[in-house]
Amino acid sequence: MREVFQQELAEVQSRLVQIAELVEIAIQQATTAFRTSDVSLAEQVIENNERVEQMAAELDELTIDILARQQPVASDLRLMVGSLRMGSSLERMADLAEHIAQLARYRYPESAIPQGLRKTFARMGELDAKIAGKLVELLRTQDPAFIDEIRDIDDMIDELHAKVFEKVLSDKVNTDTTGVVDATLASRYHERFGDHAVNISRQVNYFLRGALL
Amino acid sequence: MREVFQQELAEVQSRLVQIAELVEIAIQQATTAFRTSDVSLAEQVIENNERVEQMAAELDELTIDILARQQPVASDLRLMVGSLRMGSSLERMADLAEHIAQLARYRYPESAIPQGLRKTFARMGELDAKIAGKLVELLRTQDPAFIDEIRDIDDMIDELHAKVFEKVLSDKVNTDTTGVVDATLASRYHERFGDHAVNISRQVNYFLRGALL
């Protein structure tokens, strides 16, 4: 029984990695589409989101099935609950990538990024893609070093989020009201994306520490 | 054993109702603080959020404890998983109420609501408070009629969310960049609050329908 359970845990882990990989592709494409006003790339992100939703729903079903059949307790039970939470955060990250892609699509052929904020959003997009990559690595290797890296990248994203507002509210950004609305929403989506990566890394941290006790 | 489990389910339900009641108070106070620029009311919302976080964490612990001791299967298991999800959505609703209160506090003694949007935000705030009240009733009575009401209120909130952007992007709103940023964020927070109420009502719907099969 224990061996079967170990195999099932490995399956859960492998599915989490697969979903995280799709999220990484989604945010890479979404931030590229946003930066370059590439409407067909934006549409691809929007289309692909269904696949993440489906995989997250399947992972939920698998986890509930394991709970029912294996009746895990203690740390194994918490791992299953953690899997439900991580799946839900990954799904939300894919939604946020989709929102960024939608902003790019709405404003096409105009750019959704106001003049004066291009560099800031390019950097924020890079960091969102980077944090997603580190999350894939964390889920794959379970190396706790990635937890600190994810927290550090999120701190940088938060700083850029504050900088977007600072710039928008100064006279450094030359834009109309549409630009201010787009920048506000886009910055919020980028920032929330990082928050969810931190949430997931905290779940992993919890298990890694628990395993050490 | 079954009787004990029934008692524990009742306890979970009662805790969900208690947290939802705190969320209802939080959104009532937050939207009032936002509308009237009442900084001390805003600070009360921010302070009270800790209590919701704590109660949601305690509900999570109780649910995990029930899972470990009772080893529920089938619909009972799904009810426990649903409780984890509902707790997490309620916590997020309280966070969004806190964000609205924070906007009111940041702009004090100025109003965070631009001229021309007062009525729209007053109505959105009323609907957020109303949807929270319906959610309390749904969780308390498990009467499926509230599920449709919640969906209808959310549709109205979504319409107002679109209206905020329409007004901001027209010349009907006389405001500066700060006002545009505040209105964008506030509208987004109000809209997400409704989404989470719908998520929770879907969880309840799932169980009520399941119970009928």
Image (spheres, coloured by chain):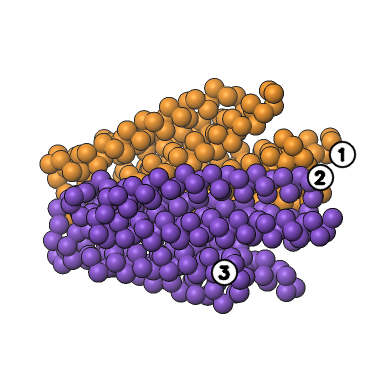
Chain colours: A orange, B purple
Between circles 2 and 3, the one closer to the viewer is 3
On the image, the x and y values in percent for residue B19 come to 53, 55
Sequence order check: which comes first, mark 1 or mark 2?
A: 1
Residue A167, label in figure? none
Circle 2 marks a residue in which chain?
A: A
**Separation of marks 1 and 3 at Cα, in angstroms:** 41 Å
Circle 3 marks a residue in which chain?
A: B
Circle 1 marks a residue in which chain?
A: A
SS of the residue under disc 3: helix
The residue under the point 61% across, 65% down is B204
Q: Do labels 2 and 3 share a chain?
A: no
The one nearer the camera, A196 or A52, is A196
SS of the residue under disc 1: loop
Residue position for label 1 = A1
On the image, the x and y values in percent for residue A190 come to 38, 43
B194 left or right, relative to A110 = right
Position of A211 relative to B20 (above/below): above
Residue position for label 2 = A70
The one nearer the camera, A177 or B88, is B88
The one nearer the camera, B170 or B112, is B112
User: Residue A120's quadrant in the figure?
Assistant: top left
Report the label total. Answer: 3
Q: Which residue lies furthest to the right in this view?
A: A1
Q: How crowded is mark 2: few (under 14 residues within 10 Å), some or many (20 or more)?
A: some
SS of the residue under disc 2: helix
On the image, the x and y values in percent for residue B81 come to 67, 53
Q: How crowded is mark 3: few (under 14 residues within 10 Å), some or many (20 or more)?
A: many
